[in-house]
Amino acid sequence: MAILIDDPLWPAHGRRWAHLVSDSNLDELHEFAAANGIPRRGFDLDHYDVPEEAHARLVAAGAQHVSGHTLVRALIASGLRVRGRDRR
């Protein structure tokens, strides 16, 4: 089991954001986020949106830094991925 984080490339609300996911378990993801000060409101069905300034801290806490492509592939392989068309 691993927590993965990609690069903070996504602009919104005057800052850039990364995605934080689990490769196996949403409970593991929620526990990691809570333990590292990421608010539950940042959760978006299968990932947390995390601000750029939290990136290094999350990696230091154990999140594995991966490319966006690797993150999405791991999320799909885990069965946790929520497709865009299913987000409605």
Image (tube, grey):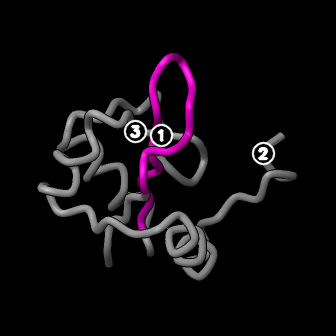
Question: What residue sits right under mark 1 in the picture?
Answer: 49
Number of numbered discs present? 3
Q: CA distance from mark 1 to mark 2?
A: 15 Å
Q: On the rendered structure, is 14 left or right of 44?
A: left
Judge by depth and name the residue closer to the eye, 70 or 20. 70
Q: CA distance from mark 3 to mark 1?
A: 4 Å
Indicate the quadrant containing the N terminus: top left, top right, bottom left or bottom right: bottom left
Mark 1 residue crowding within 10 angstroms, few (<14) / some (14–19) / many (20+): many
Single out the mark in the foreground, 3 or 2. Answer: 3
Please state the horizontal and vertical placement of residue 3, each as a whole percent of the image: 33, 65
Q: Residue at x 35, y 37 (%)?
A: 52
Under mark 1, the amino acid is Asp
Indicate the quadrant containing the C terminus: top left, top right, bottom left or bottom right: top right
Mark 3 residue crowding within 10 angstroms, few (<14) / some (14–19) / many (20+): many
Under mark 2, the amino acid is Arg
**Labelled pair 3, 1 in contact (Cβ < 8 Å):** yes
Q: On the rendered structure, is 76 left or right of 20?
A: right
Q: Secondary structure at mark 2?
A: loop
The dot on residue 87 is 2
What segment is highlighted magenta in the picture?
7-22
Q: If you read the primary sequence from the N terminus, does the residue marked by circle 1 or circle 2 appear first?
A: 1
In the rendered image, residue 19 lying in the magenta stretch gets the answer yes
- As drawn, 78 above or below 84: below
Q: Residue at x 29, y 45 (%)?
A: 33
Which image quadrant for residue 36?
A: top left
Q: CA distance from mark 3 to mark 2?
A: 19 Å
Q: Residue at x 60, y 47 (%)?
A: 45
Question: What residue sits right under mark 3 in the picture?
Answer: 50
- As drawn, 2 above or below 52: below
Q: Which residue is farthest bottom?
A: 77
Q: If you read the primary sequence from the N terminus, does the residue marked by circle 3 or circle 2 appear first?
A: 3
